[in-house]
Each structure stands twice: as structure tokens, then as C-alpha cells.
């Protein structure tokens, strides 16, 4: 192990509980030991996932939020005796690894509940809500400190919680924590004065308009979390550790509007001055640790940073708040091991919080210890499988129900939390298999096939592996993408996979000597059909280095077009986005954590965006568009970049011998590319 990393592997304490190292698995929705949306039960998939992490040198594991009451159905968690009985038996085995485990308990979501679009009518129609209430009580799930606008469903107000309901939850926290203690769980974490969830909504003035004992003054706004920790200590004893998930600063400018890194703005949530007081106040109330970052659902990209956010984006604020408390403080948010180790060494924080990197590579801590950093598969912060809750104009949450139920999967690692679906065995018949295309899909299939015992040959028409992902990884903010390409290239060498470079396969018949063929030839860009379109630059050509002037019109406001506009702005250019639909980045399962950053960035930096507008002509130095009002408008343009999508480009049709994967099969993202590769490779 690199000597600089040694501070990460020193023991520390939360109350009287000693943790063997400073690496903390932060909680992720979908990884609860009691299930996620299903009725409370002991979740074997989550338990197996955590046991694997514990055996691979994680110091403290905090599973994803366990709601006090079922999301589907209304049963209280503390009444799930069967689940706690299994948990007790599990903890006996878990502790043999030397790791510790805290269960995170949540009061709920309030206005931040990411209501699926098909359930919005249940919020608007009381009669319909009453019919489905025994199964899915949306009114309860969205209940907030005050009548508040939903973060997700436009035009919907969430009802106010009654004092009786608050008191019930306080007691439920205590009863559930006692059950956890009796099951051998090392501590509990309260969710949370954090990220704009329900309890946090009580604490911030812009979401708490109450006039009773839970609103108004500082003490009243923070009464709910204080009552929770005191009730738990009374039920479990003063020595039983209680951590608090905590957002240092809200980073929020308004409802559905966050503040960008480095931006000067007026905070409407918790600012740093208040946070200094809050941290000490909550410590004195009885909390034994702060598990900290920043943000709210209105500024979601602070708590769930996409690739556009800086590395270690919350460290400065968390390190500052550490000065005001005597309890340990964990920092999360794109944390890097070397930076974290140095911060721990200097007493700025007590431990490093990491979440989604564990979904990609559950053994990364062991690899760190073994000085195998280059073998760690990097998380690229895409949120394409772990946090697919999407939102755009007219759609509350476009996430597929299957994804809502099975959150915390991984685009880059299909085996994560998959219930055994992608477990595979050595092939009964070893085959000679050709793969046409050395992009991510081709390489992923090659790895699985080789691991199963097949002989694989990749035919790549260029002199590099990576395919279109090379271009996609070109912007400055895609450093982790570039690391991922290098990781794949290294695996190809380690696995001795045969690669034929500069070998373009145009006719599948030349591969007749192979038992089976996988086609991973990608897609071709769609062309704009207007006068002057021949003078446009394709998105991939721009990403591959095509030069542009200062004034650049980007036609297409999907994710690729928006990322190109963002890249242009960072380079000092003046981008303009033209999009035919009524919002940017309209795509189900494209995380709001990612899209809200780009939307906020364009708004804050006054990047012109023309929605419901189409390009009618491209001339020399200008673009003519027709706006949604029917007006024709001419926009100055030194260059025009077209990003209006792709069409699959397979070189053969699929049959029993020929299999098509990646964008050649269906244009999507890394998740669709990699999961399809596994679907095929595990069955050949």
C-alpha cells in the first residue's frame, strides 16, 4: 500500500464503537437490509452485497435508507419481527469480518418523494388516492412540514404533516433503533438533516411555514431531529451510537433551483453561519457522528455529484464544519483516496465516505491496500442504473418501475444487486468467437466470454480500443471516462484477448471459420435535412477535435448536445442550443442529478436555449430557426454542431450464429451497451 494512504487505515471511534479504518460505505437508496419499495423483509441481495464489502476491508457499512413504514403498504418497520430475527443471525456472521454496520432509518421524503409519473393523479385526486391508499399511500409519502410544491410533480402541493404523525415517527425511530440494537447492529443513522428530505424540510425556513412547536424559531425548526435522538438514547442507552446524515449547506437558490460550485448566490436554505450553530446544537442533543455533504433535492447534484461536479466537491465545507464539533465527521461527494487520506492526516475530517464506487467495483478497497490502483474499475458518475429518477417538463419521474424497485444497480457492473441474474458458469462447450468492434460493448463481451473459457478475437477497424466512447470521453470533465477506457485496455492485456487492429470487417462471411460472431459496430449519426446542412459538424467530429469558432449553434438538446454546449462554454465559446421538444434532455431514466446541473448551469450562465424550435436554414455565419410562436429568427453562428441522435449500424442481421450488441443493436447508453453484452455473453 502507498504510504500516503496510511491515514485511511487507522482506527477511530464513534462513541464507544471502534471502526478499524476510515473508509465508510455511505447509504444508497435501494440497498436497505429491509428491502426498498417492497414490504419489509430481510433483503438477501443487500445482505450478500454488504458481506462481500465487509470481507474486502470496508470499515463501516451503512445500508440504504430503511423507511419507518413500508412504501407499499403502511406497516411499521419495528413490527417486522421476522426480518429482525434474520438480521440478528446475519450480524453474528458479519462481525467475524471485523467491519461495523449502522442501519440508516428515515422518516421519509416529504416534497422530495420522487413520485412516478403514473401516480401523480393520486396526488391530485383525493377519491383515487383513497382507493389505492392501502397499497400505496402517496398522500402520506409526500406529506411535508407545510403545504409545499412537489419537487417532481408540477402543479402539485404536498399536504402538511399533523403533530400526531410527527410524534408517531419519533417513537417509531426509538422502537426501531432498539430492535436494531437487539439484533446486534452497531449503531443507527438518522436520515436526515440532509438533502432536503422530510426532516431537513423541517429545519429550513423556505420549506417550514409552521406556526406550532415545530416551526418558526431555530429551536422549533430543529425540534424533530432533536426529539428523535433523545428518544433513541432513552430507548437504547446513552452509549448506543446515533449518526446523523447531514447537509452542511443547502446550496439552494429557490424551489427547483440549485447553486453551482463557486457561484455567488443568496441561500434560502441552511447557510454556513447557521450550520456552524446547528452542528454543535445537534451534537449536544446526542448525535455521535455527522455523515456529511451538501445540497437538497433542489440542488441535487451536491449530494449525488455527476461528472460535471469537481472531485471532493464537499470537502471544503465539511472540513469547515468539523471545527465546530467534537464528534467525528465523515465527508462524502466524489471523494478521492489520496485527498481524503491527507484531510484525515490534517484533522480536517475523520473518515472518507464513498457510495457508488462500491457498486462498480466492490473490491476497490482491497485493491487499494494491495497497491493495484490501476485495476480499480472507476465510477463515472453516470447514474444510468443506480439513480435513474428522471424529470423533465410534463413528466414527474420517468424512471421505469423496475428501476424504482431495484435501485443501486450499476451500469458498468451488471452483477451488482442483480439477484443472481448474471451469475454465470464456465461454458460447457468452448467456442471460437469473433467480436466485430472494439468499443466498450465488444470489450465487455470479450471479458465475460474469455472468463467462461471461450477463445475470443476482437476485430477493430482503428488502431485503438474504445470505439465512440473515445470521443465521448474527450471533454475535460470526462476524466473518469478516460480512466475507464484505460481500465478496459488493461484488462484486454491481462486476459490475453486477441485483438486485430486496423482490420475492418465489412462482410460477415469472412468470419465463417468462427463458431459464433458478435457484432458491435455501433451507430451512425443522423443527418440534418435542411439547406446548408452539408456545412455542419457532427457531434463526434467535434469531440474528436474539429475546430470551431466563438459562436457555435448546437442543434439537439439531448444529453450529448447539452454536454457539448457545456464543453464549449468551458472553453470560452458562446454556445446556443436549439431543441425541437419542450425541454432539454428529455429521456426516461436519465438522472435528474445530472440533468438539473446542466439546466441550472445554462440558466445561471445565460446560455441561450430555444425550445420547441427547429432549424430551417444554415447559411454562411448564421442559422435560421422557427420558434414555437412561429417567428423566424436568425442566430449568429461561426459553426453548427449537429447532435440529433444515431441510428444502429450493424454489418449483419441477427441469427442463431450472429449476435448484435451495443448501439448496433439499439442506441442507448453504457448501461444498455454493457448489460446487453452480458445478456449475450453469459448464454453463449
Image (cartoon, helix red, strand yellow):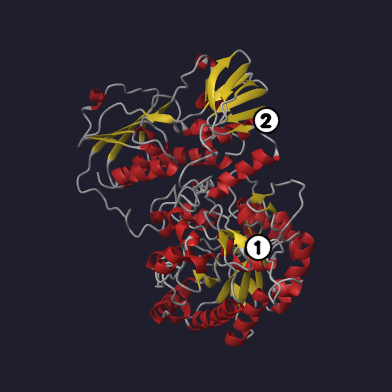
Residue 292 disc label: 1
How much space separates mark 1 and mark 2, taking CA atoms?
33 Å
Is there any visible trace of residue 48 in the rendered image? yes
Pick the front one: 537 or 126 = 126
Can you tell which mark lies on residue 581?
Answer: none
Left or right side of 432 for 625 = right
Residue at the (55%, 80%) spot, across then down: 168
- Taking the spot 25% from the left edge, 30% from the top edge, the residue there is 653
Above or below — where is 190 with respect to 658?
Answer: below
Whether residue 63 appears in this view of the structure is no
Image quarter for residue 353? bottom right
The first of marks 1 and 2 along the sequence is: 1
Q: In the image, residue 305 lies at what x, y percent?
A: 60, 50
Labelled disc at residue 571: 2
- Could you tell me which residue is drawn at 33 percent across and 58 percent down? 420
User: Mark 2: which secondary structure?
Assistant: loop
* Image spot of residue 124 (x, y percent): 50, 59
Q: Is residue 626 above or below residue 144?
A: above
Q: Quadrant of the N terminus?
A: bottom right
| Residue 665 image point, x, y percent | 33, 35
Which residue is at 64% across, 30% downward? 568
Amino acid at each position: 500500500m502507498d504510504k500516503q494512504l496510511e491515514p485511511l487505515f487507522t482506527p477511530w471511534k464513534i462513541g464507544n464503537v471502534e471502526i478499524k479504518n476510515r473508509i465508510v460505505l455511505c447509504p444508497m437508496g435501494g440497498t436497505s437490509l429491509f428491502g426498498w419499495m417492497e414490504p419489509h423483509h430481510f433483503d438477501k441481495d443487500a445482505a450478500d452485497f454488504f458481506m462481500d464489502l465487509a470481507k474486502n476491508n470496508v470499515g463501516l457499512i451503512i445500508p440504504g435508507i430503511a423507511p419507518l413504514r413500508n412504501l407499499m403498504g403502511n406497516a411499521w418497520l419495528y413490527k417486522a419481527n421476522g426480518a429482525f430475527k434474520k438480521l440478528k443471525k446475519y450480524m453474528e456472521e458479519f462481525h467475524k469480518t471485523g467491519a461495523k454496520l449502522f442501519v440508516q432509518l428515515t422518516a421519509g421524503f416529504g416534497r422530495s418523494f420522487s413520485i412516478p409519473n403514473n401516480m401523480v393523479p393520486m396526488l391530485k385526486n383525493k377519491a383515487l388516492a383513497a382507493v389505492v391508499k392501502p397499497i400505496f399511500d402517496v398522500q402520506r409519502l409526500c406529506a411535508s412540514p407545510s403545504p409545499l410544491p412537489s419537487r417532481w410533480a408540477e402543479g402539485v402541493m404536498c399536504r402538511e404533516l399533523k403533530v400526531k404523525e410527527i410524534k408517531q415517527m419519533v417513537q417509531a425511530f426509538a422502537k426501531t433503533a432498539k430492535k436494531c440494537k437487539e439484533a446486534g447492529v452497531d449503531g443507527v443513522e438518522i436520515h436526515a438533516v440532509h438533502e432536503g428530505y422530510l426532516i431537513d424540510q423541517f429545519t429550513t425556513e423556505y420549506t417550514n411555514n409552521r406556526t406550532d412547536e415545530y416551526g418558526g424559531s431555530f429551536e422549533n425548526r430543529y425540534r424533530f431531529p432533536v426529539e428523535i435522538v433523545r428518544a433513541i438514547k432513552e430507548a437504547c442507552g446513552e452509549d448506543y451510537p446515533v449518526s446523523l446524515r447531514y447537509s452542511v449547506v443547502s446550496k439552494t437558490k429557490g424551489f427547483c433551483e440549485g447553486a453551482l460550485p463557486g457561484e455567488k448566490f443568496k441561500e434560502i436554505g441552511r447557510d454556513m453561519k447557521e450550520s456552524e450553530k446547528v452542528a454543535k446544537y445537534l451534537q449536544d442533543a446526542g448525535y455521535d457522528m455527522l455523515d456529511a455533504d451538501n445540497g437538497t433535492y433542489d440542488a441535487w447534484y451536491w449530494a449525488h455529484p455527476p461528472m460535471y461536479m469537481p472531485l471532493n466537491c464537499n470537502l471544503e465545507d465539511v472540513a469547515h464544519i468539523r471545527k465546530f464539533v467534537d464528534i467525528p465527521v465523515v465527508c462524502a461527494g466524489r471523494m478521492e483516496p489520496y485527498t481524503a487520506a491527507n484531510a484525515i492526516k490534517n484533522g480536517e475530517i475523520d473518515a472518507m465516505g464513498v457510495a457508488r464506487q462500491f457498486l462498480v467495483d466492490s473490491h476497490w478497497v482491497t485493491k487499494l491496500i494491495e497497491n493495484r490502483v490501476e485495476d480499480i474499475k472507476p465510477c463515472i458518475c453516470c447514474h444510468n442504473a443506480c439513480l435513474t429518477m428522471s424529470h423533465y417538463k410534463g413528466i414527474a419521474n420517468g424512471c421505469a418501475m423496475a428501476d424504482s424497485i431495484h435501485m443501486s444497480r450499476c451500469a458498468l457492473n451488471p452483477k451488482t444487486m442483480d439477484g443472481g441474474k448474471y451469475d454465470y458458469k464456465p461454458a460447457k462447450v468452448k467456442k471460437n468467437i469473433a467480436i466485430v468492434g472494439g468499443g466498450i460493448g465488444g470489450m465487455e463481451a470479450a471479458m465475460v466470454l474469455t472468463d467462461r473459457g471461450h477463445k475470443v478475437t476482437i476485430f477493430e477497424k482503428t488502431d485503438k480500443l474504445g470505439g465512440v466512447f473515445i470521443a465521448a470521453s474527450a471533454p475535460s470533465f470526462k476524466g473518469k471516462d478516460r480512466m475507464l477506457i484505460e481500465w478496459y485496455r488493461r484488462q484486454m492485456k491481462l486476459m490475453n484477448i486477441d485483438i486485430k487492429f486496423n482490420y475492418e470487417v465489412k462482410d460477415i462471411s469472412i468470419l465463417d471459420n468462427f463458431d459464433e460472431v458478435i457484432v458491435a459496430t455501433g451507430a451512425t449519426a443522423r443527418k440534418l435535412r435542411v439547406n446548408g446542412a452539408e456545412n455542419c459538424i457532427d457531434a463526434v467530429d467535434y469531440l474528436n477535435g474539429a475546430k470551431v469558432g466563438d459562436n457555435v449553434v448546437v442543434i439537439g438538446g439531448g444529453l450529448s448536445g447539452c454536454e457539448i454546449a457545456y464543453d464549449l462554454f468551458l472553453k470560452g465559446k458562446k454556445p446556443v442550443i436549439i431543441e425541437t421538444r419542450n425541454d432539454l434532455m428529455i429521456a426516461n431514466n436519465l438522472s435528474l442529478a445530472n440533468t438539473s446541473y446542466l439546466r441550472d448551469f445554462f440558466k445561471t450562465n445565460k446560455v441561450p436555449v430555444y425550445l420547441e424550435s427547429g432549424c430551417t436554414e444554415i447559411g454562411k455565419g448564421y442559422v435560421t430557426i422557427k420558434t414555437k410562436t412561429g417567428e423566424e429568427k436568425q442566430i449568429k453562428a461561426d459553426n453548427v454542431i449537429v447532435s440529433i441522435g444515431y441510428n444502429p449500424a450493424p454489418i449483419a442481421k441477427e441469427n442463431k450464429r450472429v449476435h448484435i450488441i451495443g448501439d448496433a443493436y439499439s442506441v442507448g447508453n453504457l448501461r444498455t451497451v454493457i448489460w446487453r453484452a452480458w445478456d449475450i455473453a453469459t448464454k453463449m
